[in-house]
Amino acid sequence: MRILLLLILCSVQSITFAQIGASGIRADFNYDWETSPDVDSMKKQTTRYDATILKDHRIMEYTVNAAKGRYEIYYTKHFLVHLNSDKAIEEYNTIALPQHDVERLVSIKARTISPKGKIKNLDRYADFKEVANYENNGPFLIFALQGLETGSYVEYLYTFEKKFTMVGTEYYRSKYPVREAEAEFYAPKTAFNFSFLPCNAEFVDLDESGGSGGKISYKFGTDLPGRTEEQYAANEAAIPRIEFRVNKEGSGEFSERTYWKTIGEGLWNYLTVLPKSEYKTCKKLYKKIVPSSVTSPEEKVRAIENYLKKNIQFEPNPQTDAFEKPSGIISKKTASASGLVRMYLLLSRYAGVKCQVVATLSRFEKTFDPDFATYGFLRDYVIYFPELDLYLSPNDYTLRLGYIPEELTCQKGLFMGTMTSEGPVFDYDLKSLVCHSWDKNLNNINATASFDLDGGMVNVAYQHTYTGFEASGMQGYKLVISGEKDQQDFLNRVLQNYSGKNEPKNIVVTGNTEADLCKNPLVMKMNYSSEQLLEKAGPKYIFHVGDLIGPQSELYRDTMPRLNWIENNHNRGYVRKLIVEIPEGYKITNPDAVIFNVTHGADNNEITQFKSVYKMEGNKMIIDIKETYGTIRYPKEDYEPFRKVINAAADFNKVVLYLEKQK
Amino acid sequence: MRYSPIFLFLFGTVAAVAQVNQLPQLQAKYPSENAVFTIRQEVATVSPDANGINISIANKEDLVLLTDQVNGYNERKIYFSSFTSISNIVAKTFSADNNVSVARDIAITNEISPGTFFDDYKAHRVLFPNLQKGSKLSLSYVEKMTEPRFFSRYFFSSYAPTELSEYSVIAAEGVKLRWKMYGLKEGEYEYTQTTQGRNTIHTWRVKNVKRMDTEPDAPAYSYFAPHVVVLIDSYTWKGKTTQLLADEKALYSWYYSLVEKVNTEESPEVKKVADSLTHNLTSDAEKVKAVFYWVQDHIKYVAFEDGMGGFIPRESKLVCSRRFGDCKDMASIITSLCHAAGVKNVYLTWIGTRDIPYTYEDVPAPMSDNHMIATFVENGKYYFLDGTGRNLPFGTPTAMIQGKEALIGMGPDKFEVVKVPSMGIEQNRRIDTIEINVAKNMLQGTGKAVLAGYDKIDFAYRINGLNDQKKKDEYLTGLVSKGNNKFTSGDFITNYFTDRSRPAEVTYNWQLPDYARENGNEIYINMHLNKWFRNDLLDASKRSVARELEYKYHDTFVYILNIPAGYKPTYVPEGLRYEHPLFNFDIHYTAKNGKIICEQSVTINTLLITPADFDDWNKMVKQLNKIYTESVILEKIN
């Protein structure tokens, strides 16, 4: 789901074309690749990696086309890569360029340069293919490079006229080193200036002149190491990139906050300025769906949410504007992302529950930076009810009031407007969304193990309790899979995870109805038997007590220097109580094997820890485990202690107890 | 669009029946389903005229939503390609109280097939509005086919159970059909043949069709899904008969017409490559082998399949210069290079991968194949040359065509259909020999793995030509991994992964911390460092579909434990064998000369474990599970 990127042009409309004149339309643009590339000097820049990107050069030029009376953007990309292996050839021998934001293809060329410098050009007409709507992702331009062998270079250069936008992001996404990553920006001096936010890399200013010939210009450059994916990381958000924004020239210096205000106001008006009839439609609907007996604000919101999530389909890529406004939504029972937001806003008005719209984006995609105003940070909508201090996701149908997609939590966002019972009022703020503490997302186990030594079996009375995000995945999944049969299959798969394939018995599952979603814990109770928990060593028994908690995530082999900061999906806690009923005449010879104490951070709610202790009561050994992840984000310097906690759980999973006959 | 009156009559009846609100009965009948098709129907009209043969298929389906869980049912895609066109799409949602909403949101999307860089498959994406419990989603459209050889098959089951699933073919006078039913025995479907005027109407009808479920590692859908294949043998118009797909000969004759104009002239570029590869080779087999290896190593797989481009190989000189192509292009360049090297008995060959269940005899139609290779025939021996393979030795087919029929084109009107062999357990072997030393709780030592057959080919694909040492070590660690996820390994020496003529070898050092269990004077070591098929039971009561394996194999692990100084073995478990012609294992221990040797081997001698074999399979798995719990005991000598 994506917020429609509105062209609310930050008052750019007020610039008149007459002010600018006809100059500046690409007359002086003559960027080109080397006609005869010098392979010897290119070779010197290559590395031992499977590929090296020698050049990734982007040029973004804003111009004014006075003849057509419009602004235009010309986007040029020059890419040159050395292919040092078969794998790299297979990666770069086909290129697919998305065209959804392209107005017009100005020029494109591509070639292969052999290790000895022999050039093979692609034919402009025969070798490039346009695909109109690739998997409903819009148009693509595709081509395949010819005559590649190990040591070849692939080079392509294109200029597109792009659809007009005031903001953008240039990503430098590469698992191989980039020798020259450059970004250039141009605009007519009289029309625009730029603001930049370089992220995740040191981009140096290559051109300090600020421009000439009636143009302003900026040029950044850097070289970049290749990137690999890491676990517990926001890999996408950590990619080197430049965020940019064009501003109207000569309108005075605005603060970033002022830009945010303009953006927020535009978006708020877009959502709330509607014909009176639309409000009336919602007033009528509200009366129909929320009985007057419901008086608590929270219950009113829940009733609205349940109605909408049950009756209105969400369509992320609408081809019609019928799904934007309440009247169309109610008649078609289908809504776009902003259509759903309008439904919540208008219905809340008649419920008399104040609500705000929050726009933000996944923290795994980008970190929302309040100090740089851009639509690029506004991808997803959330509804916030300030009096309840609760959030709601309008278009995630597997979540309910109180929980929004985890990637939007622990992230900042733009809070805008308040819908009151009197109508919409604009205000705005930039602040953090909810970040649930670990005790709101629990994944707990209570297990009691007893033994049938003659049969070589361990019998386990088992209870698994999930809350919050730990539960919602399963509770919500149940809603989107069709039919009882699939749901039963799904449940069986979950159960098998914990008990091997011995058919669990006496299964009681509670908290798995729609009404429980994001409200009540999901509890699975069962009895199971397993022969795998008990190994034999002659007359002695080895009891795999660690297996009672199931397989655990581990970072054993991950010893490379860490590149990215640590990012958890959500804070969470695993509280386990394991009771071992020692068979008569036997003793456990190594009970201390279950003791663990691995922690990171101060001993408060934000601690990351794996602690395990035990006590003996009669013939029972009672083990208490507390594993918590209380801090969503750590700097990369904290990786080692964090890894130790993760691995402690995986170590516990391998702990065994020895059962020996008492002498 | 031309419809016969009968055709309209058929649809009229169906529409009237479906108008009745059946929600309560359907809910009672399908208590655990969210949706049910009350009808799925296709009516094909096949009629010749002066210009050839017209085929149009009228499709209709009604899906009723039985519960509140209506999410996910609103989107429907109608697929087409350059050989078909879609028209008259009508999509409507009828509410339980019979209000009608018409779907107007219909967009065309490109639906590129997986593994293909470009093809011309597209879909109309229809969005049904206004869904709620009790809604009936009614869709109809007409598909027109321009190539009669792609006619036709119909699957009776779908993603929701179906009350009535029906396929009809209205064949005009002079149209000769053949049909064959798959996945249904006689009595499990109704077939009627009636005559109306000059038309013959064939109808296949199945009631109460179960929902199609998928299972992990299942063979392709068409192996078990009930469906009927209907082919047009020939048609006659004004006394003139046109052969289409009467038999293999007719199919081949069409295929030949598609390729006869390809590579008719020898290109200097191709000749130059052929000469450079074969100039010092004398035997034909050596020459073909050199060509086959060069193509595997130098022509990258990139599939552009556009219209007839999906059926006609490109000129070999173009493939040679581009250095890329799809399967047909690789077959094209293999044959051309061999011909240029003077070996003429190398032929273009049509073949279906194991995703396709049909034989050419039963289904002499393009739907029986989806792939092209080259075949070298010498002294009655057939060498199947699949250029899309990597690291394949000469004489080894790719795993995906084992056991399939190859249609070898040997010239005008000359072809052979030959079955590709499946590689046996003698070819696909792994032997991993591991020396184990005990250092407190840690096990460590050296290992040597020898890989032959598909095991080697698959692994060579991962590591050959990979420069990233870290990645390579990760793959190799994955290959030799043992015990649990604390296993680490390094100092890898790899040999013969690029030599197709012999098994590959990997030697390595390894460590497994905290694996040995020290308890007082004793150390317990579970020597099952690879637990094949642990817990891997197949439940015949829940699964009706066979499990497919990529290839047959025989793997052996030899664990040699050096008893640490000052210790003696006090307990060595018993070994165990399980005998079965399709799958078996043998685990045995020997203790001598300060060592305990545990040798374990497992054999999978089939490509398909059918439900009839599930009981035997489970017996094996249960025996394995039992033996996996046994440890060796070493005791300190006082």
Image: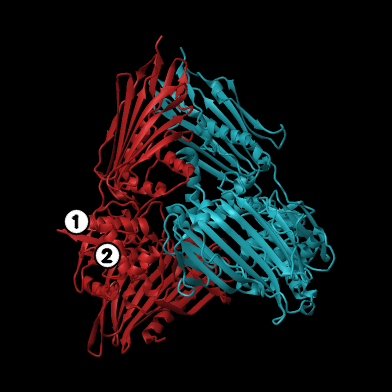
Residue B588 horizontal/vertical position (percent)? 29, 29
Mark 1 to mark 2 CA distance (whole Å)? 18 Å
In the image, residue B540 above or below residue A502? below
Chain identifier, colour red:
B
Residue A578 horizontal/vertical position (percent)? 56, 30
Q: Is residue B317 visible?
A: yes
A128 and B290: which is toward the camera = B290
Label 2 element class: helix
Question: In which chain is the residue bearing label 2?
Answer: B
Question: In which chain is the residue bearing label 1?
Answer: B
Give the mark nearer the N terminus: 1 vs 2: 1
Q: Is residue B21 visible?
A: no
Residue at the disc numbered 1: B282
Instruction: Please give the name of the residue rendered at 69% of the width and 64% of the height, measured from the top-left corner.
Output: A185
Colour scheme used in the picture? by chain
What is the drawing colour of chain A? cyan
B29 and B442: which is toward the camera = B442
B114 and A418: which is toward the camera = B114
Residue B238 horizontal/vertical position (percent)? 25, 90
Dot 1, crowdedness within 10 Å: few (<14), some or many (≥20)? few
Using the rendered view, name the quadrant where residue B405 is placed: bottom left
Residue B556 falls left or right of residue A219: left
The type of residue carrying mark 1 is Thr
Residue B497 falls left or right of residue A645: left
View extreme (right): residue: A252
In the image, residue A89 above or below residue A324? above
Instruction: Please give the name of the residue rendered at 73% of the width and 61% of the height, measured from the top-left corner.
Output: A374
Residue at the disc numbered 2: B335
View extreme (top): residue: B638
In the image, residue B256 above or below residue B525? below
The type of residue carrying mark 2 is Thr
Rendered-image quadrant of the N terminus of chain A: bottom right
